[in-house]
Image (spheres, rainbow, N blue to C red):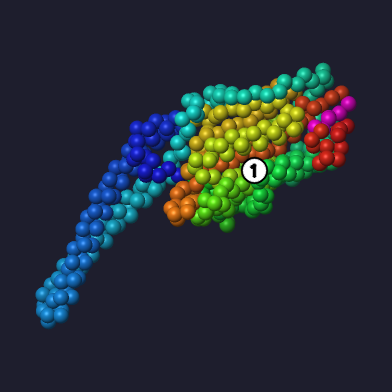
């Protein structure tokens, strides 16, 4: 969540940054500042009345000692009137604070100055491209045909059990899924991330803390009776481990990794984008999360990007890195880099990871602070990234590594699968 200080420090800059994300409610900035001005004026009146009440209380005490009860009683009636006026003004202050808060929570994070302008994915900036695009044999087919041919994933069976977007993994398909999860976890642990296992459902406070609520409420599965949400990503429960926490700076950085299933309604998705593994309602993902000092967070972001790159290189997949434009970024992000791998059979790029720095935005909502050696408290920076999301990785592995005789498993993954070929 943005702070009043951020909006007041340079109001023109705040509006420009918010407009960079193409939001409709930039006028909220002026409203928030106007409400805050009113709040300060009324708060000054309250403070003046409280001062008057304290002065009168002392006078009443002195009069009572002198035996002047009648004069003291007159002053007591004055105090009662002051209390009534104070209560009325404090109610106005409370109402203004609610008005400010209701607007603040709807404003997205400021995008970093290097975030490109634009509204759609077509406006994203390709900052790096690695690997040659594979040339497949003449009989190559997309992954939804490969999974049926080798009995790896049953989409129809998942549809019968639950509905579209909930596949059943079978045999070597299930083994490949498990192998990738273990591989990603092991590589993150080698890189210094501490593994955590977290709940797969969260409460409303947790969803608010990381910015999914209220912004993405319609995209989350909601357990209405208990007012709980199925997680859209492990980012939510892992980051909320540190909600309402003050962390000693000497314990930073904090680096966590966790595997969870993820659940997304994906309302409005259709066409080729949802075919096979391209877009699911339930999928597996390994997530990395970092809590950093502000001055270290962008070096940490670079480190996270290198980590995701190393995974894609080990899987022998061509990839590219995009810096997202303002209109394509999430509500909470200050800057986001997407990784895409090339799907040779579909002849298109598929997103497999987003790595983001949220700066202080999530920390302010989470009340996540750090303290230095002088016990001075300040907001931390939070970051997270997919390392990696499995469905499209599996799709690309199957398609890009298919041969006339079967599907080759990348060398780095063989110790985990215990087989080097699907045939």
User: Which image quadrant is residue 277 in?
Assistant: top right
Q: Which residues are magenta?
A: 405-410
Residue behind mark 1: 287
**Residue drawn 19% across and 70% down?**
57
Q: Is residue 219 visible?
A: no
**Residue drawn 24% across and 54% down?**
44
**Residue drawn 55% across and 29% down?**
324
Q: Nearer the viewer, residue 257 or 266?
A: 257
* Quadrant in the picture for the N terminus: top left
Which residue, as the protein is rendered here, is positioned at the far front?
373
Question: Residue 336: where, in percent of width, then height?
Answer: 55, 34
Considering the numbered disc 1 on the image, is that residue within a helix, a strand or a loop? strand
Vertically, is 422 above or below 192? above
Question: Residue 236: where, in percent of width, then height?
Answer: 58, 47
| Label 1 CA crowd tier, 10 Å (few <14, some 14–19, many 20+) | many
**Residue drawn 53% across and 31% down?**
328
Q: Is residue 387 visible?
A: yes
Question: Residue 23: where, in percent of width, then height?
Answer: 44, 33
Q: How many numbered markers are drawn?
A: 1
């Amino acid at each position: 969540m943005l702070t009043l200080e951020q909006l007041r420090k340079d109001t023109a800059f705040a509006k420009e940054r918010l407009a960079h994300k193409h939001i409709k409610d930039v006028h909220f900035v002026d409203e928030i500042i106007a409400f805050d001005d009113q709040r300060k004026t009324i708060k000054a009146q309250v403070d003046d009345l409280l001062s008057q009440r304290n002065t009168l209380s002392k006078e009443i005490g002195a009069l009572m000692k002198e035996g002047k009860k009648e004069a003291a009683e007159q002053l007591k009636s004055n105090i009662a009137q002051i209390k009534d006026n104070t209560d009325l003004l404090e109610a106005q202050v409370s109402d203004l604070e609610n008005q400010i808060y209701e607007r603040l929570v709807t404003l997205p994070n400021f995008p970093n100055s290097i975030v490109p302008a634009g509204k759609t994915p077509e406006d994203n900036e390709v900052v790096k491209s690695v690997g040659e695009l594979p040339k497949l044999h003449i009989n190559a087919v997309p992954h939804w045909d490969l999974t049926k041919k080798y009995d790896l994933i049953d989409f129809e069976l998942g549809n019968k059990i639950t509905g579209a977007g909930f596949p059943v993994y079978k045999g070597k398909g299930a083994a490949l899924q498990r192998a990738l999860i273990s591989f990603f976890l092991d590589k993150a642990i080698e890189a210094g991330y501490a593994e955590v296992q977290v709940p797969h459902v969260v409460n409303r406070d947790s969803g608010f803390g990381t910015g999914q609520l209220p912004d993405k409420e319609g995209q989350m599965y909601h357990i209405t009776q208990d007012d709980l949400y199925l997680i859209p990503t492990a980012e939510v429960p892992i980051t909320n481990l540190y909600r309402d926490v003050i962390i000693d700076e000497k314990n930073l950085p904090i680096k966590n990794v966790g595997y969870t299933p993820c659940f997304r309604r994906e309302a409005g998705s259709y066409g080729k984008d949802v075919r096979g593994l391209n877009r699911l309602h339930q999928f597996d993902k390994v997530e990395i999360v970092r809590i950093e000092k502000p001055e270290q967070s962008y070096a940490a972001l670079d480190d996270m990007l290198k980590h995701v790159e190393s995974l894609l290189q080990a899987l022998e997949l061509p990839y590219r890195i995009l810096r997202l434009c303002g209109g394509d970024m999430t509500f909470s992000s200050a800057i986001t880099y997407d990784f895409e791998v090339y799907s040779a059979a579909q002849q298109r790029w598929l997103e497999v990871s987003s790595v983001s720095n949220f700066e202080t935005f999530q920390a302010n909502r989470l009340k996540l602070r750090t303290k230095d050696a002088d016990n001075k408290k300040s907001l931390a920076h939070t970051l997270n990234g997919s390392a990696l999301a499995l469905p499209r990785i599996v799709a690309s592995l199957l398609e890009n590594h298919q041969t006339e005789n079967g599907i080759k498993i990348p060398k780095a993954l063989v110790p985990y699968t215990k087989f080097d070929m699907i045939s």
